Image (cartoon, grey):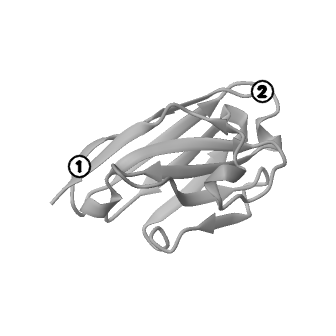
Amino acid sequence: QVQLVESGGGLVQAGGSLRLSCVASGRTFSGYGMGWVRQAPGKEREFVAAIRGNRVSTNYADSAKGRFTISRDNAKNTVYLQMNSLKPEDTAVYYCAADPFNTVVTAPRGYKYWGQGTQVTVSS
């Protein structure tokens, strides 16, 4: 079992940047694949980015490529999502999620553990 707590969301103008953080409980953080998933009002959850425990293997949604960077610090039990060049369509609740099989999960339903989410609002 792992518990996830996100932070770093907020209101930003288009073109701005935010860095989301997610702290995980437990001593086996490096054994989890981690990801970020977002959900905009009235829409389904959408994969954003994922990273394996080795910190090397990553995957991004097309909408995130070139603008977002996922990273992790296993010593701090933390995964990050650096978001640059933000657009109004990036507005959503961003969730941190964990996969106990340490894979790069691109389907939201593939994650077993979820945080409570952090709101990101991008104004035009």
Do the CB atoms of the residues marked 1 and 2 lie less than 8 Å apart? no
Which amino acid type is marked by label 2? Gln
According to the image, label 2 marks what residue?
Answer: 1
Closer to the camera, 78 or 43? 43
Where is residue 36? Give x, y as percent: 56, 50
Where is residue 79? Give x, y as percent: 60, 43
On screen, residue 54 versus residue 107, left or right, reads right
Q: Which mark is residue 12?
A: 1
Where is residue 72? Give x, y as percent: 64, 47
Which amino acid type is marked by label 1? Val
Residue under the point 49% across and 72% down: 65
* Label 2 neighbour load within 10 Å: few <14, some 14-19, many 20+: few
Q: Quadrant of residue 76?
A: top right
On screen, residue 117 versus residue 18, left or right, reads right
Residue under the point 78% across and 26% down: 1
Q: Quadrant of residue 43?
A: bottom left
* Label 1 neighbour load within 10 Å: few <14, some 14-19, many 20+: some
State the quadrant of the C terminus: bottom left
On screen, residue 20 versus residue 70, left or right, reads left
Where is residue 40? Give x, y as percent: 37, 52
Mark 1 or mark 2: which comes first in sequence?
A: 2
Mark 2 residue element: loop
Query: Please, is residue 57 above or below residue 116 in the view?
Result: below
Residue under the point 81% across and 42% down: 100
